[in-house]
Image (spheres, rainbow, N blue to C red):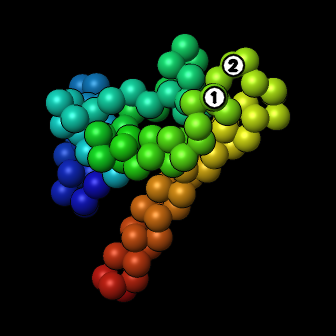
């Protein structure tokens, strides 16, 4: 999210308006492209984060590297735990890349 978008978002929040739902990774707040991502890869889980379609696709691509059979509930808890770790790791990888980019942008302005 650029500085101007951030400023507008904070301004709305200060005025008592609910800020728009935004991608947890990149800050995209266009409601037409926001999807709810099940962090642990289970569409029945309550642990969800809003992601734009682009960020969601990147995480899903990592999850899909594990075969559906290995991530099904019928396999061992070890496979399920490994899949959860991969799912969370994919989200953290995107967040980490975003933080690095923000830090680099900040150093340019110093």
Depicted 97 relative to depicted 104: above or below: above
Can residue 31 be seen by looking at this rendering? yes
Residue 81, numbered circle:
none
| Quarter that holds the N terminus | bottom left
| Crowding near the residue tagged with mark 1, few <14, some 14–19, many ≥20 C-alpha atoms within 10 Å | few
Residue 58: give x, y in percent of width and height.
40, 49
Q: Is residue 12 visible?
A: no
Q: In the displayed orientation, state which residue is furthest to the top.
A: 44
**Residue matched to label 2:** 73
Residue carrying label 1: 69
Question: Is residue 56 left or right of 31 when viewed as pictured?
Answer: right
Q: Quadrant of residue 41?
A: top right
Establish if 98 lies above or below 67. Answer: below
Label 1: element kind: helix
Instruction: Judge whether 27 appears above or below 37 on screen.
Output: below
| Residue depicted at 38% across the width and 41% down the height | 56
Q: Residue at x 69, y 43 (%)?
A: 85
Q: Position of residue 73 (x, y in %)?
A: 69, 19
| Image quadrant in which the C terminus is located | bottom left
């Amino acid at each position: 999210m650029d500085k101007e978008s951030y400023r507008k978002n904070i301004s709305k929040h200060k005025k008592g308006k609910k800020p728009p739902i935004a991608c947890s990774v990149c800050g995209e707040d266009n409601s037409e492209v926001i999807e709810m991502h099940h962090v642990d890869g289970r569409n029945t889980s309550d642990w969800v984060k809003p992601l734009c379609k682009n960020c969601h696709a990147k995480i899903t691509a990592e999850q899909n590297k594990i075969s559906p059979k290995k991530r099904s509930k019928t396999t061992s808890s070890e496979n399920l735990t490994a899949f959860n770790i991969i799912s969370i790791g994919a989200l953290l990888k995107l967040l980490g890349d975003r933080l690095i980019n923000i830090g680099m942008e900040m150093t340019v302005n110093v």
